[in-house]
Amino acid sequence: MKHYIGVDHHKKFSYMTVMDERGKVVKEGRVANSQGAVNKFLGEKYREGTSAVLEAGRNWTVMHDWLEELVAEVVLAHPVKVRAIAEAKIKTDKIDAKILAHLLRSDLVPKAYVSDKETRKVKNILRQRMFFVKMLTMVKNRVHTIVDRHPDVIGDLVFSDLFGRQGIEWLKKAPFPKEDRKLLDEDIDIIEYLRGKISSSDQLVASLGKKDKRVELLMTIPGIGKFFALLIVNEIGDIGRFRNKNKFASYAGLVPSVYASGGRIVHGRIVKSGNKYLRWALIEAVWPAIKKDIDLEEVYQSLKMRKGANQAKVAIARRLSVIVYRVLSQQRPYYISSGRPHFSVAEAIH
């Protein structure tokens, strides 16, 4: 008889419910989060021909990989969609595990995409570098705030980049008041530390994706270098899992929220759901993209005049998502060797 296992996964333990084909619970209980404990709970009886399901939560990969070695099939459930299907006023680990088993038995689990183990390792490396870059940006913003408090100290700077070699040397020696001098010294130490970490990770990133044609294709898009190309490729996986450019933009979290009532439709800010790493990469690629592509710059300047800089930036990121979708799905570069677009922005987004 086939069995279905619902797993409500937590940090230190999981609650597991084993259900047979008729929907009868044949075993359930709280299990410590260790491979040995999971192995002992399932025994030999609930392995062959058994399917298991757990939600895509924090560190789901650990339990997923343990189960993958023990049972025939492991399904990763989309947590938001599961809640929409099986909303319950009474919520306990036992009930959650039972609901998951029922949904799996009835083939109603809204599945989430699961990357292979090697891709997950690469994603962790790239996400770590992205984390350092975001932290570096935060610290730079703090430095700008401190410096801007003292226009008399700034004077007429002879360099354009405050965080270039000359800028950092000036920051270290400039006569700021004692309290802000201390804050600046601490922030400069953090900047240099983070730059060292980013430089170290760059050496590892340089060795990745050398034989991946998708990375080469994405690097023909203005604003997308090696790191962004690697991040995008590994966050997407198979581009064929998206039916069209709109589905892909939604996955990237670059579509507006919609409020509809009484025949009136209002579009709000971009949705909070979606792949935050992919969204970050596409938004960060906007500035270098509009500097390199005159068509994108014209669109950006037009939108900026009408809607403001932030909305214009998100709109360009959305257009970049469409170009990414076209390039990967059609397997052709955005730029050809002569430097001219293989297809125009207008062609790419329609």
Image (cartoon, rainbow, N blue to C red):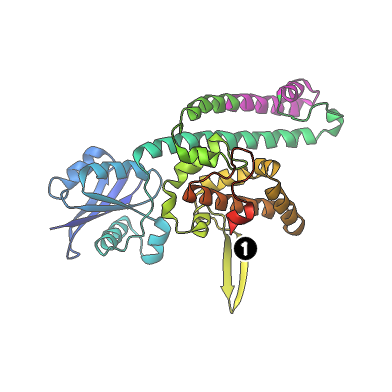
Quadrant showing the C terminus: bottom right
- Badge 1 crowding class, 10 Å Cα cut-off, few under 14, some 14 to 19, many 20 or more, is few
Quick check: can you spot residue 89? no
Q: Please state the horizontal and vertical placement of residue 230, each as a whole percent of the image.
A: 49, 38
Vertical relation: 304 (above or below) 131: below
Asked if residue 179 is among those painted magenta in the image, a careful observer would answer: yes
| 45 with respect to 339 (left or right) | left
* Residue 127 is one of the magenta-drawn residues: no
Residue topped by disc 1: 268
* Quadrant of the drawing holding the N terminus: bottom left
- Secondary structure under badge 1? strand
Asked whether, in this view, residue 348 is left or right of residue 111, the answer is right
Is residue 89 shown above or below 165? below
Q: Residue at x 38, y 43 (%)?
A: 59
Q: Position of residue 98 (x, y in %)?
A: 27, 60
Q: Position of 193 compared to 173: left or right?
A: left
Q: Which residues are magenta?
A: 165-194
Indicate the amino acid at tag 1. Answer: Gly
Which is nearer the eye, 301 or 28? 301
Magenta segment, principal secondary structure?
helix
